[in-house]
Image (cartoon, rainbow, N blue to C red):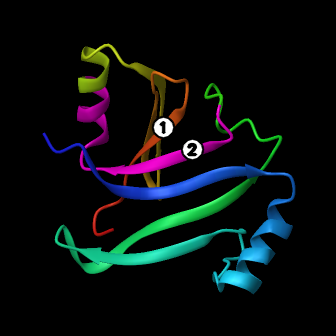
Amino acid sequence: MKRVTGIGGIFFKARDPQGLAAWYREHLGLELQEWGGVVFQWAGTDNPSGQGSTIWSPFDEGSDYFLPGRAPFMINFRVADLHALLAALRQEGCDVQDKVEDSPLGKFGWVIDPEGNKVELWEPPPGQ
C-alpha cells in the first residue's frame, strides 16, 4: 500500500500570525491568500497536471488545533488512501486519533508520533 505521497502543508503557531505572514509577503514574496496562508502549486510524476499544492499557514499561538500534540507546529502529509493507512497504523500500534474528517477539501485523519507531535494525514479530493 502506498502511504505518504508528499507534504500537504506546514502549519505553525505564531504570536502574531497576520503580522508574521505580512513579513513573509514583504520580504520573501509569499503570495498570501485571504485566509492568511500560502498555496504552493506543484506537479510531479504522480500528478503531472500540477493540480496538487502545499499549504504554508501560521496559526495563533493559542490555537488548540495541534492538540493533543505538544509541538508548536504540525506537518500535513498527503496520502493515497486515508482509511487504509489509518487502519494499518492502528494495527502497527500507533497512536491514531479517533476523529476522521470528510469535507470538500478531502479526508483528514491524525496520528501522534513517538515524540508527541500531531501529524495530519490528508487524502486530497480526486484530481488534486
Q: Residue at x 65, y 86 (%)?
A: 29
Q: Quadrant of residue 2?
A: top left
Q: Position of residue 1 (x, y in %)?
A: 13, 39
Amino acid at the residue labelled 1:
Val
Q: Residue at the left extreme? A: 1
Q: Looking at the image, do the residues carrying marks 1 and 2 touch, with CB atoms under 8 Å apart?
A: yes
Q: Nearer the viewer, residue 123 or 114?
A: 114
Q: Is residue 57 magenta?
A: no
| Residue at the disc numbered 1 | 119
Q: Which of 86 and 19 is in front in this view?
A: 19
Amino acid at the residue labelled 2:
Met
Label 2: how many residues lie within 10 Å, few (<14), some (14-19) or many (20+)?
many
Q: Which residue is drawn at 67% across and 39% down?
A: 65
21 left or right of 101 in image: right
Q: Is residue 85 magenta?
A: yes
The label on residue 74 is: 2
